[in-house]
Image (spheres, grey):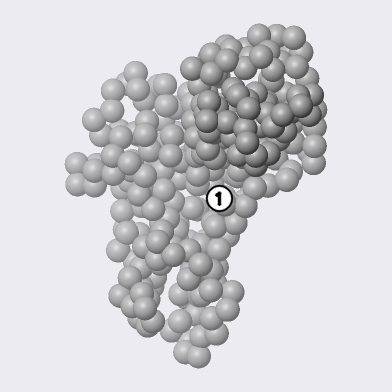
């Protein structure tokens, strides 16, 4: 990680904290297939941007803007890359400035005529995937556009398709019986399940979540009251949503296990803020 960067309006303390988090995030990740990059903001570009650099490609791929502050931009990049085992780097914006003005990514036909591929991918990724996989260019001038669309298709797979083999990222946390405190987790999935030990419909929530380092946790949030249906939460239970950020005040490590190459930590006695 090159920390000799020109960080516009970022205090040394914030920069040190963020770079430490990036280093932890990259633990176990690989650059064999290139990397994702955050370009720094400047006095003329107030935002941080998200790029994909492929190996053996001359031009980096602009994906989207992130935020106007360094720490918020890195948090957003962490979220985008939570199921991807490719490294995240930060580089000076001047190294990418010339690529903002590329002209081979404009659509000159169809409903998005005049727009760039990055804009279209942000609002309608299915259209870019159609360009990559279904569009048959009858003119040679469209071949470069299709090639770029195929790069966006790779990005789409890396950012949205959950990988089965990410054991290099996910690790077992704590020792069995240990009490963990102050866990900040992002919810990956939630499944409703019936407490079979009770005669009525007590609907629990089985949660899969990950911390900022990609470590996977599973735990059950018990129903706060009886439900009228096995498919509906009690009105007294807090509904947990996918992508929600949870603050666990404390939780006990009940067990560790591995499935499809991914390490999981099972928690019990969970206390939410």
From the image, tell me which residue sits under label 1: 159
Q: What residue do we see at 55% from left, 50% from top?
A: 159
The location of residue 204, given as percent across then percent down, is: 66, 30
The location of residue 267, given as percent across then percent down, is: 69, 20
In the image, taking residue 6 as reference, residue 195 lies left or right, namely right
Q: Nearer the viewer, residue 192 or 41?
A: 192
Above or below 40: residue 14: above
Above or below 45: residue 135: below
Label 1's element? helix
Instruction: Please count the marks in the image.
Output: 1
Above or below 122: residue 196: above
In the image, taking residue 95 as reference, residue 183 lies left or right, namely right
**Res. 157 image quadrant:** bottom right
**Residue 119 appears anywhere in the view:** yes
Q: What residue do we see at 19% from left, 41% from top?
A: 43
The location of residue 220, given as percent across then percent down, is: 67, 26
In the image, taking residue 47 as reference, residue 52 lies left or right, namely right
């Amino acid at each position: 990680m090159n920390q000799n960067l020109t960080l516009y309006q970022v205090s040394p303390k914030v920069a040190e904290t963020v770079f430490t988090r990036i280093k932890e995030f990259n633990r176990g990740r690989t650059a064999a297939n290139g990397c994702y990059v955050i370009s720094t903001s400047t006095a003329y570009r107030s935002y941080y941007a998200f790029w994909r650099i492929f190996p053996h490609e001359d031009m980096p791929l602009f994906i989207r803007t992130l935020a106007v502050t360094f720490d918020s931009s890195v948090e957003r990049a962490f979220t985008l890359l939570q199921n991807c085992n490719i490294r995240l780097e930060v580089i000076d914006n001047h190294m990418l400035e010339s690529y903002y003005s590329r002209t081979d990514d404009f659509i000159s036909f169809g409903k998005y005529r005049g727009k760039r591929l990055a804009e279209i991918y942000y609002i309608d990724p299915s259209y870019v995937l159609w360009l990559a996989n279904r569009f048959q260019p009858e003119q040679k001038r469209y071949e470069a556009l299709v090639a770029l669309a195929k790069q966006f298709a790779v990005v789409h797979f890396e950012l949205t398709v959950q990988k089965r083999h990410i054991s290099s990222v996910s690790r077992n946390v704590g020792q069995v019986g240990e009490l963990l405190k102050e866990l900040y987790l992002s919810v990956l999935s939630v499944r409703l399940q019936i407490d079979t030990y009770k005669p009525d419909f007590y609907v629990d929530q089985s949660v899969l979540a990950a911390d900022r380092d990609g470590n996977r946790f599973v735990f059950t949030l018990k129903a706060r009251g009886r439900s009228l249906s096995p498919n509906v939460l009690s009105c007294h239970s807090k509904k947990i949503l996918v992508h929600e950020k949870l603050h666990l005040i404390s939780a006990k490590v009940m067990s560790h296990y591995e499935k499809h190459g991914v390490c999981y930590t099972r928690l019990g006695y969970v206390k939410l803020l």
